[in-house]
Image (cartoon, rainbow, N blue to C red):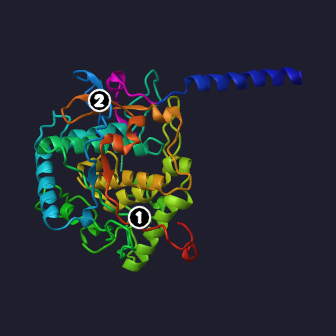
Amino acid sequence: MASIVATVLLIQCLLSILLTTTLAAPINITRETFRTCRPGNWFGNPADCCPPKVIKGPIVDFCPQYDATKPLRVRKALQCLSGHELKTYTRKLEKGYALMRALPDSDPRSLKRQNEIHCAYGTGSFIQDGSTNLTIDVHINWHFLPWHRMFVYFHEKILQKLLGDPEFSLHFWNFDNSVTATPRHGSRGCYKAGHFVPPMYNDPSKATFEANRSFMTFEPNRPVDIALDLSQLSPLLGPPTFPNNTVEEQTRLNREIMHRSMITLANTTSFFGKAYRVGDARILIPAAGAGTIELWPHNTLHAYIGGWMMQPTTAPIDPLFYPFHANMERLWSVWRKLGYGNDDPTDPDWLDATFLFWDENAVMRRVKVRDFVDLNALGYTFEEVNDASWIFFDNSTSPGAP
Ligand code: C2O
């Protein structure tokens, strides 16, 4: 009797392995995904942000075209721009956002529609094809880094198009750099701290400004706080209260957090976050699925900036979202360069995941994760700055991770 039960259990188990291995597949967004979009939710708050259910026109595969004769565009650190370059850049940025804000809501390139698509992808509004209840999320799992790189990529393309300048780059907010250092002998790049909201995004007369942010972000010399205890980050509790740390304390804490998220805890699995494929349920608790830098500094900074940035339903309304996320993906490339055997996942369910985005011509593009891991193929790179200002942090002074 016992052996019959054991055999039945073994067969059941083998069957379920067979079933899950054949069913598991990369997340794949299609026309059908848009057609079946329905209101989602975020932490229980309803979110009604489906894009139009019918995708007009063709869906065109996106293939990065690498032109080796062309120099790579360089995304630079905002705090390091100066003189003429700073002036020109601020003027372009201002013009780009003024034009983007002027687009009608019917245009998928408008700021409102870009926010809408981020919201749909981030609230379980999209359902996995062929399912009735399994939804899609691009947060709290391994799609967080590549999906947001794609989102920022198309945002940058739209700005280029509106400005008529294909060389325009969306520079990054180097919030992870809390130290102003003297460059070491032979090193290149800018060594200025970047942990303040970049001034060009804090000027009320500019289209890059957003008033709906926490009061702390308007204090020009206040370093951001990325070290918040995650248990405080529940939208049910309202905006968290940030302690009034001295600049020295804050700087030390920020470096410690960066060191932990980029090095101590950051092997490939924990850096990217949990696997998420067809057949998986949406992960709702950040600490249960998010990669290290998604939790800190990403989630903590969203909370620190506050206002629209507090929630994925509204965050991309604030133009600060984009240089912030440009730095998030820069940290991904910094992580790869650190050594320690750091490398991207090789799982085909990650590499072959497919998403849809409207491009700069309002054409729907089908985009694969595997096409967004190599920046050179995408034609841009990040300026070398004090890339790992948190690397020499001495753990012995650590009071213990929050
Ligand atoms: Cu989709 Cu910073 O969030």
Quadrant for residue 225, please give it. bottom left
User: 128 or 372: nearer the eye?
Assistant: 372
Q: Are marks 2 and 1 in contact (CB under 8 Å)?
A: no
Q: Local crowd at mark 1 within 10 Å, few (<14), some, or many (≥20)?
A: many
User: Can the viewer see residue 42?
Assistant: no
Specify the amino acid type for callout 1. Answer: Ile
Ligand 1 within 8 A of label 1's CB? no
Residue 15 lies, in percent from the top left, at 68, 21
- The N terminus sits in image quarter: top right
Q: Is residue 95 left or right of residue 385?
A: left
Quadrant for residue 110, please give it. top left
User: 237 or 311: nearer the eye?
Assistant: 311
For label 1, the residue is: 226
Q: Is residue 129 above or below residue 282?
A: above
Marks 2 and 1 sit apart, C-alpha to C-alpha, by: 34 Å
Q: Along the polypeptide, which appears first: circle 2 or circle 1? A: 1
Q: Is residue 246 left or right of residue 345?
A: left
Q: Is residue 180 above or below residue 62?
A: below
Q: Local crowd at mark 2 within 10 Å, few (<14), some, or many (≥20)?
A: some
Please report the residue visible at 49 percent of the width from the left and 54 percent of the height from the top.
292
Specify the amino acid type for callout 2. Answer: Arg
Q: Which residues are magenta?
A: 27-44
Magenta span contains residue 41 = yes
Q: Secondary structure at mark 1?
A: loop
Instruction: For marks 2 and 1, give the one nearer the viewer.
Output: 2
The mark total stands at 2
Residue 302 lies, in percent from the top left, at 35, 56
User: Can the viewer see residue 4?
Assistant: yes
User: What label sits on residue 365 in the rendered view?
Assistant: 2
Residue 285 lies, in percent from the top left, at 50, 48
Please report the residue visible at 22 percent of the width from the left and 38 percent of the height from the top.
113
Q: Secondary structure at mark 2?
A: strand
